């Protein structure tokens, strides 16, 4: 597989994992706490709550996917390795990790009252685990270009990558 094909495959992989994590967060969040929260809300039935929760989940997933895509594009097209000290871009990667965690917790915290839905505290932990854990951390480990393959924390634990 040549370099251009690998780049396209990895971009599609980022999009697919973003869609998968969004679906997982929606499914788990709606099954874990959705019905109890919807019935406890004023003037809200379960189907309306699900519709608004899907909007919230989709916004959070899209923003986290943009964090992973930003890392891939920066590492693939903008960063260069001129010397051994210049190989590590962990500060930039960690900044995007913190941004992903802030998005995972902040978007539901700010956007849920705007939509008029109530959220349980477990939703915030669920979003952080799914979007930051799988949607950013694992995704960047497996899609980072080879020149920066050990930049994401924990990348040394995974030996074989494509």
Image: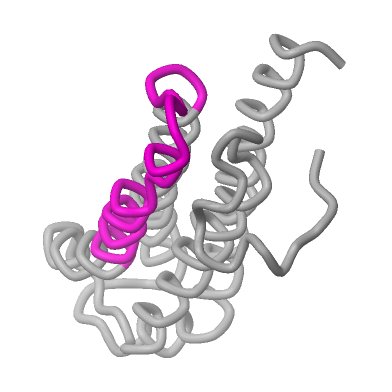
Task: Name the side, left or right, on which 100 lies relative to 2.
Answer: left
- In x, y percent, where is residue 26? 53, 63
- Dominant SS in magenta: helix
Q: Split into 4 quadrants, where in the image is the C terminus?
A: top right
Q: Specify how the rendered protein is coloured.
A: one colour
Nearer to the camera, 82 or 103: 82
Task: Name the residue located 59 percent from the left edge and 40 percent from the top edge.
Answer: 144
- In x, y percent, where is residue 50? 45, 63
Residue 42, visible in the rendered structure: yes
Task: Name the side, left or right, on which 107 lies relative to 133.
Answer: left
Task: Name the side, left or right, on which 134 lies relative to 108.
Answer: right
Residue 56, visible in the rendered structure: no
Identify the image quadrant of residue 149.
top right
- In x, y percent, where is residue 36? 43, 90
- In x, y percent, where is residue 25? 53, 65
Task: Name the residue located 37 percent from the left edge and 66 percent from the top edge.
Answer: 49
Magenta-colored span: 76-104
Task: Name the residue located 24 percent from the left edge and 64 percent from the top edge.
Answer: 102
Whether residue 153 is in magenta: the answer is no
């Amino acid at each position: 597989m040549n370099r251009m094909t690998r780049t396209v495959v990895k971009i599609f992989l980022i999009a697919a994992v973003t869609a998968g994590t969004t679906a997982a967060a929606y499914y788990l969040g709606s099954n874990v706490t959705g019905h109890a929260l919807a019935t406890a809300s004023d003037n809200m039935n379960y189907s309306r709550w699900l519709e608004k929760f899907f909007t919230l989940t989709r916004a959070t997933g899209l923003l986290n996917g943009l964090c992973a895509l930003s890392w891939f594009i920066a590492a693939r097209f903008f960063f260069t390795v001129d010397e051994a000290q210049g190989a590590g871009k962990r500060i930039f990667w960690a900044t995007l990790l913190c941004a992903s965690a802030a998005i995972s917790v902040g978007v539901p915290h700010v956007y849920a009252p705007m939509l008029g839905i109530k959220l349980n505290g477990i939703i915030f932990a669920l979003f952080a685990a799914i979007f930051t854990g799988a949607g950013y951390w694992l995704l960047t480990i497996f899609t980072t270009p080879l020149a920066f393959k050990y930049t994401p924390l924990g990348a040394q634990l995974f030996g074989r990558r494509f």
